[in-house]
Amino acid sequence: MKITSVHTAILRIPEDDPLADMPEEAGRFRPVVILRVRTDAGIEGIGLTFYGGAMTGTLRAAVDELVALIVGDDPLRIEAIHRKLGAAAGDNCGPAGIFTLALSAIDIALWDIKGKVLDQPLWRLLGGMRDRVPTYASGSLRRGLTDDQAATAARRLVEKGFVEMKTQMALPGDPSPAEEVRRVRVVRDAIGPDIKLMCDLNQRWRPEQAIDIGKRVEDVGLFWLEDVTACDDYQGLARINAALATPIAGGEYVWGIVPFRHMIEARSVDIVMIDLVRVGGVTQWLKVAGMAEAFNLPVVSHVIPEMHLHLIAAVPNGLTVEYMPWMLKLYQETPPIERGQLVLPNKPGLGLTFDEAALKSFTVA
C-alpha cells in the first residue's frame, strides 16, 4: 500500500461553550489545519493540527511540504516516516514549533489509516486497556466569568451529568490571594463536595504565589492544580509540588518527548498532561505515557477529546480525558458520554468521519 495524495485546509472553529452556554468571550475562533491522506487501497486517514495562531498559514504550508515528501511511501511504516521527515527538516528546525505541529497532523492521519487497514479502533490497536474512560468538562468555568456566571455554569454541568470539571484561577486584574481563594470556593459551593474539581493556572503564577495560594485552597479538595508556573521551570514546579498536598498536573505546553523526561526526573508533577499536537502525534504520545508509567505516574489529555479518548483508554496509566468540545462539530458522529464516562467507538481507526457541510462552513483557505 502506498500514499497517493494529500489535501489540507484551514478552518475557523468557534470557541463557544456548548456545555454550559457561558462563553468567556463571544465570537472567538480557533484556526485549525485539517489533513486528509489517501492511499492506493482507497483508505483515507484524517488528522489535524493547530496552535499556529497568526502563523496558521505557515503551519498549513509546513504540513503540505512535509506530507509531500511521503507520497509513494508505505503509510504503515510510521517510525520510518518519522525518521525521514526528521532528517529532511526536523534536525534543522525541530524538535519544537511548526515542524512538530505539522508532524503531528501527519502522524495522526497515519495511525487512522493503520487502524482502518487492520479493521481495529485505535484504542484497541494501541493496547485496549478499557472501553470507557472518565472525562471532565472543560472550557465552561473560565477566569473571565463573574462569580454568578461561574456558579451558574458549574450547576449546569452537574445537571448534565458531569462528575468531573475544571475551573481556573489566576483571575484577571492581579487580584489578591483572598480573591483567588474566594472564587474557587464559589465553584466548589455550587457543585458540592463530591464532584472532582480541577483548577488550571495556565502558567500565570510565580512559584511563591503558587505555594501561598495553593496552601490556602487545600481544604477545597481540588483534584489537581494545573500548570501552576512556567512549564519549563522544572525546579520551581518541584518546589511547588513538594510544598502542596494538592496534586500538580503539567505538560501540555512542552514539546516532544525529552522535556517530559526532565519534568518527571525533577518530580515536577504528579500527573502528566500530554498534548497530542505539541508532543508530535500518537507515536510520541505513547512514548511519554510509557515513560510516565515507569515512574508510577498517571497521564491525562489536553483538548481534542474525540482523539485523546483512544490514547487514555489504550494505556494502563490513563486517568481522565479533558472534554473540551470545540472540534466535535467537525464530525458526523462523536463518542457519547454515559455517567461521566466516554464510550469508546468500535469503528476502525479514529472512528471519525468529517461532516462535509460543517467543513465547508468553517473553511477559510
Image (spheres, rainbow, N blue to C red):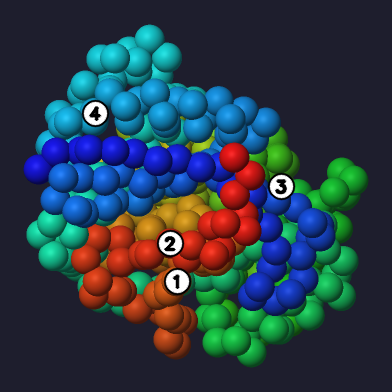
Q: Earlier in the sequence, mark 1 or mark 4?
A: 4
For mark 4, give the secondary structure.
loop
Position of the C terminus, as image quadrant, is top right
Visible residue check, residue 333: yes
Residue 325 position in % (x across, y down): 56, 65
Q: Earlier in the sequence, mark 4 or mark 3?
A: 4
For mark 3, give the secondary structure.
helix
- Three-letter amino acid code of the residue under disc 3: Asp
- Three-letter amino acid code of the residue under disc 4: Ile
Q: Which residue is mark 3?
A: 212
**Which circle marks residue 332 in the picture?**
1
Q: CA distance from mark 1 to mark 4?
A: 29 Å
Residue 284 position in % (x across, y down): 29, 39
Q: Neighbour class for label 3 at 10 Å: few (<14), some, many (≥20)?
A: some
Q: CA distance from mark 4 to mark 2?
A: 23 Å
For mark 1, give the secondary structure.
loop
Q: Residue at x 45, y 25 (%)?
A: 62
**Which circle marks residue 354 in the picture?**
2
Q: Is mark 2 in CB contact (under 8 Å) with mark 3?
A: no
For mark 2, give the secondary structure.
loop
- Three-letter amino acid code of the residue under disc 2: Phe
Q: Earlier in the sequence, mark 2 or mark 3?
A: 3
Q: CA distance from mark 2 to mark 3?
A: 47 Å
Front residue (pair 79, 284) = 79
Q: Earlier in the sequence, mark 2 or mark 1?
A: 1
Q: Is mark 2 in CB contact (under 8 Å) with mark 1?
A: yes
**Which circle marks residue 70 in the picture?**
4
Front residue (pair 227, 110) = 110
Q: Is residue 235 above or below residue 185?
A: above
Q: Is residue 161 above or below residue 115?
A: below
